[in-house]
Image (tube, grey):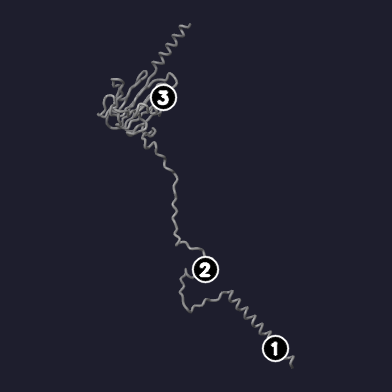
Amino acid sequence: MAFTFFVAVILYTAILVRSETHTISFDNQCGYGTPKLIKGNDVLSSTSYTTNGSLASAIAYLDTGSCLFNGEGCTVVEVTLTNPTTAGSGSSVDISLIPPLAFSVNTSFQYTTGVCSGQGASCATPDCSTAFFHPDDTWVQVACQEYDADLRISFCGGDSAFLPSSSSSSSSTEPESSETTETVPSTTESSVEAPPSSVNEVHSTVVAATSLPSTSGYKPRPSCSQKRRSSMSVTILDTVDALGDAATQAMVGLDV
């Protein structure tokens, strides 16, 4: 019984090992150069490559004619694709510009399988922040804990349009504020007139605005209130005169 269980475990493990597979594909939009996938001393592919099992310590780059065999003088993608066996293990891919490697073309990669799909990095400039420049720049590695993880490597565009910005300048640039400052036209003091504080000032303002001609013989017409006051004064004077006449007559009568 124990022997049967042991054989079953061995067979199951063998099936898992045999079933592991990974595919690496290229997307070259540069219009020149030849993609190369290299492991050790062997060129594995220039188009698409599928491995039955893990693929460790491989490199990929676009051979523009100036690259040496191990990618010297060009942008290199370092590839390890393997199924995870423990927590933290699994696939790991990165872009390297550690000398004698050097920036050559816009290079990007992304996983295309499972929960890792869309994860990757892009390097579009010689000072991109997503590539190795020193061996301890380990934060640029992109890991994947997915089984049978596949990978796509692009040159001169492709996936780089959908990946986080890779240049140091664009990563530090803050988004422009959507607020707009409204400019209020200034008004000079000479164009602002204080409101008149009295009726006389209103009258003066109206006269000035209508530009009435000034003549020495001009006399303003009396207002209605002035006419009423004048009429009342005449009436009062007439009444006083009448009373005076009556008093005078009365005194004359007494003397008689």
Question: Which amino acid, by three-letter code, is at mark 3?
Answer: Cys
Question: Which amino acid, by three-letter code, is at mark 2?
Answer: Glu
Residue 215 position within the rendered picture, expressed as x and y whole percent measured from the top left: 46, 77
Q: At x 58% / y 75%, what residue is drawn?
A: 226
* Residue hosting label 2: 201
Label 2 crowd bin: few (<14), some (14–19), many (20+), radius 10 Å = few
Residue 209 position within the rendered picture, expressed as x and y whole percent measured from the top left: 47, 68
Residue 62 position within the rendered picture, expressed as x and y whole percent measured from the top left: 29, 28
Q: At x 45% / y 58%, what residue is drawn?
A: 187
Q: CA distance from mark 1 to mark 3?
A: 133 Å
166 vs 233, left or right, is: left
Residue 47 position within the rendered picture, expressed as x and y whole percent measured from the top left: 30, 25
- Asked if disc 3 and disc 2 are in contact, CB closer than 8 Å, the reply is no
As rendered, which of 159 and 144 lies closer to the eye? 144
As rendered, which of 155 and 80 lies closer to the eye? 80
Q: Quadrant of residue 24?
A: top left
Nearer to us: label 1 or label 3: 1
Query: Which quadrant, please, contains the C terminus?
Result: bottom right
Q: What number of labels is visible? A: 3
Q: Which of the marked residues, 2 or 1, is nearer the chain's N terminus?
A: 2
Q: CA distance from mark 3 to mark 2?
A: 86 Å
**Under tag 2, what secondary structure?**
helix
* Residue hosting label 1: 248
The mark found on residue 144 in the picture is: 3
**Under tag 1, what secondary structure?**
helix
Question: Which amino acid, by three-letter code, is at mark 1?
Answer: Thr
Q: Is residue 75 above or below residue 15?
A: below
**Under tag 3, what secondary structure?**
strand
Q: Is residue 64 above or below residue 236?
A: above
Q: Quadrant of residue 74?
A: top left
